[in-house]
Amino acid sequence: MRSSPFAWADRLLAPAPAAKRVAFLSGQPYAHRGLHGPGVPENSRAAFAAAVRAGHGIECDVQVSRDGEAFVFHDDRLDRLTAERGPVVERTAAALSTIGLSGCDERLPRLEEVLALVAGRVPILIELKAPGRSVARLCMAVRRTLEGYRGPVAVMSFNPLVCHWFGTHAPRTVRGLVVTEEGRRNPRGRVERHLALWRARPDFLAYDVRDLPSRFAAASRMRGLPLLTWTVRDPVAAQAAKTYADQPIYEQAA
C-alpha cells in the first residue's frame, strides 16, 4: 500500500496503543445495541442478556439525563422507542427510569444496570452520543459509572473531543474513534479524518463497513490500532468485515 503523506504525523500525533491494552477488542464479535429482534428491543436488558449468552461482546449507546446520569439509549429523543416525546436530556434520571421501552415490559436502563448485568462476562463498547462541543457532562457521567468496574470495556464516539476528554481525564479507559466516510470521500474529508485522529488519539477505530476497504482504515490498522466495523447486517458486509477488520459489530434477530 502506498504510504500516506500523513503517515509520519499519524505515528507522532496518534501513536498506536500497547498491544496488551487493546487485546480484548479482537477476541469476539459485538452485538450492535445488544442481540435484539422482535420482542427484544435494541439497548434493552434482554438484548444484552442474549448477547452474553452467545458469548459475544456488546455495543451500546449512552445519553445523559438532565441531572447527569448515564442512560443506555440511542436516540437523543424519546419518540421512536418509547410512548413519550421530547429530548432525553430534558428528563431527570428518576423520570427516565419510569419510561417503558416499546415492545416489551422493560424500562430505560441506566448504564450502571447494564454493567451489573454483564458483570465482566463479555466486553462492552459504550458509544457516547455527543455531537457538539459540550461533551464533559456525558463523559463525566460515564466515567463515574465505570469507577470500580472490572470487566473489559471501552468508550467510543464519532466526536474526537470525547476521546480527547477520556485521554486527559481517564487515560486508563480504552477509547475509540467512530468513523464514516459517507459524504466525505474527497480531499477535504481525508484531511478531516486525520485531524480527528490526531485530536482523539484513539486506541482503536470503529469503521463504517460501507467504506471498507479504506486506505485510512488500513493504514491505522497496520500501525497497530484494532479495527472494528459497523453495522454488519448481510453476507456481503460480513465478508468485508472478515477481510478488512478485526471484528464486526453486527445485527441479527435474537
Image (tube, helix red, strand yellow):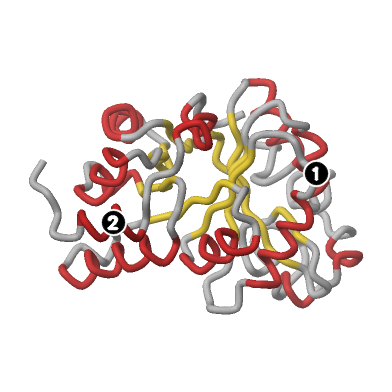
Q: Nearer the viewer, residue 177 or 19?
A: 19
Determine which quarter of the picture holds residue 36. Answer: top right
Left or right, residue 69 beside residue 29: right
Label 1 close to label 2 by CB (< 8 Å): no
**Residue, far top:** 54
In this figure, what is the number of numbered marks?
2
Badge 2 crowding class, 10 Å Cα cut-off, few under 14, some 14 to 19, many 20 or more, is many
> Residue placed at 72% from the left, 43% from the top?
44
**Residue, far left:** 2
Q: Which mark is residue 148?
A: 1
Determine which quarter of the picture holds residue 195. Answer: bottom left
Badge 1 crowding class, 10 Å Cα cut-off, few under 14, some 14 to 19, many 20 or more, is few
Residue bearing mark 2: 10
Q: Position of residue 62 (x, y in %)?
A: 66, 57
When the figure is inspected, residue 183 is found, relative to residue 142, above or below; the finding is: below
Is residue 37 visible in the rendered image? The answer is no
* Disc 2, SS: helix
> Residue placed at 62% from the left, 21% from the top?
55
Is residue 186 visible in the rendered image? The answer is yes
When the figure is inspected, residue 228 is found, relative to residue 79, above or below; the finding is: above
> Residue placed at 59% from the left, 51% from the top?
155
Left or right, residue 202 beside residue 217: right
Q: Position of residue 248 (x, y in %)?
A: 43, 34
**Amino acid beneath label 1:** Gly
